[in-house]
Amino acid sequence: MTREPAASTAAAGGALDARLRLVRDGFDLEVAFAVGAGEVLALLGPNGAGKSTVLALLAGVLRPAAGRIELDGRTLAEASDRSSTFVRPERRRIGLLGQDPTLFPHLTALENVAFGPRAAGMPRRDATALAASWLARVGLDGLAHRRPAELSGGQRQRVAIARALAARPALLLLDEPFASLDVEVVPELRWMLREQLAASGTSAVVVSHDVIDAVVLADRTAVLERGRIVDTGPTREVLAAPRSPFTAALAGVNLVVGAAADGIVVAGEATFTGDAAEPLVEGASAAAVFRPSSVVVATRRPERTSLRNVWHDRVTAIEPSPGGGVRLRFGAPPVHADVTAAAVAELELAPGSEVWLAVKAAETSLHPLAPRR
């Protein structure tokens, strides 16, 4: 299901149009999607849905049985009864960044980043200067002469990001880029990657199991299940109104979209304070994220001082919770809370009941949303 056409604003990155068909080892993949110039698309789905297969087809590691891949008007692959085209991976201007940095162990950070521009024919001095500027942009200018073994996992991934972007790809493919890193370093790296993708105007496809990666990095999200795209559209819309069981489970958090103001998120009459691991830009779109189990429901305004985020709302639906118990849905902002059946009975709740909702700031995270390009 497509909610709206892909954007196609002018940017440095390439515009991608992909229609892919592949039957392999009993798995049947058939998808069609577009990525606008300078746009970031998140590709989400359960294990075995075909996400990595899509990246392999785009990168040229696999050949489609049918379909067409076009990047900036250039045909990279086509398979039909009338014609057959296949451009080798190294000639596609497509970069690939995976879970493991796979840096050259014998080269310094500076030399690793300069490798792509040098391979493309850039003079050594210019490539070195470009590499140095990219290391500075990812916060590693002081570690330029260290080899990968002398860097932490997070630092190596920063070098890998700099190397991928320094090569000036028309399209960057990111396959679970933070999956192998310690959770403590991921928020800062995610924010850094978001900044650099936006600043360079690089088009990208991001495969991830982390919904926050989609929220922070992606303009649009496509949900892949059993080799088919079952939903696609602006990320906030896909997560706010799931159209498949997987998306509903993935979006098992409340995501309230608003605007950043003085370090908080304002969404209508509700305001949200929380942990903003990534800087919020004043006036820009931002989201508050918290779990349904963190929502306190009351018929009178809570007096507990630890509940920083408090707002008035109305029950719109009462239904079974995926984890057992009862799920309450509310309208403004559209959030849900998981409570016990006993709590529903005690509070005498029904659709239309007016209630007060509250969430601790410690259980709320704030995130800038990907810029609309």
Image: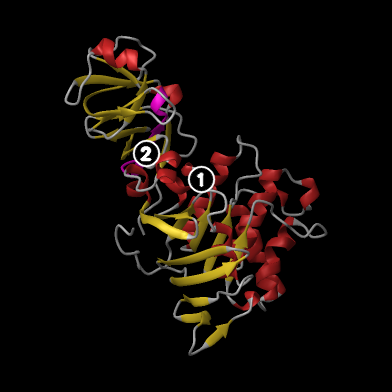
| Image position of 284 with respect to 64: above or below | above
Tell whether 15 sits left or right of 48. left
Which residue corresponds to mark 2? 287
Of the numbered discs 1 and 2, the one sitting upstream in the chain is 1
| Quadrant, the N terminus | bottom left
Work out whether residue 136 or residue 147 is closer to the camera in this orientation and state it.
147
State the CA–CA distance, disc 1 to disc 2. 14 Å
* Residue 168 painted magenta: no
Q: Residues within 10 Å of mark 1 (few under 14, many from 20)?
A: some
Q: Secondary structure at mark 2?
A: strand
- How many other residues sit within 10 Å of disc 2, few (<14), some (14-19) or many (≥20)? many
Q: Quadrant of the C terminus?
A: bottom left
Is-magenta flag for residue 285?
Answer: yes
Which residue occupies the extreme front position in the image?
26
Frontmost residue, 72 versus 44:
44
Is residue 238 placed above or below 257 in the rendered structure? below
Residues shaded magenta: 282-293
> Closer to the camera, 327 or 133?
327
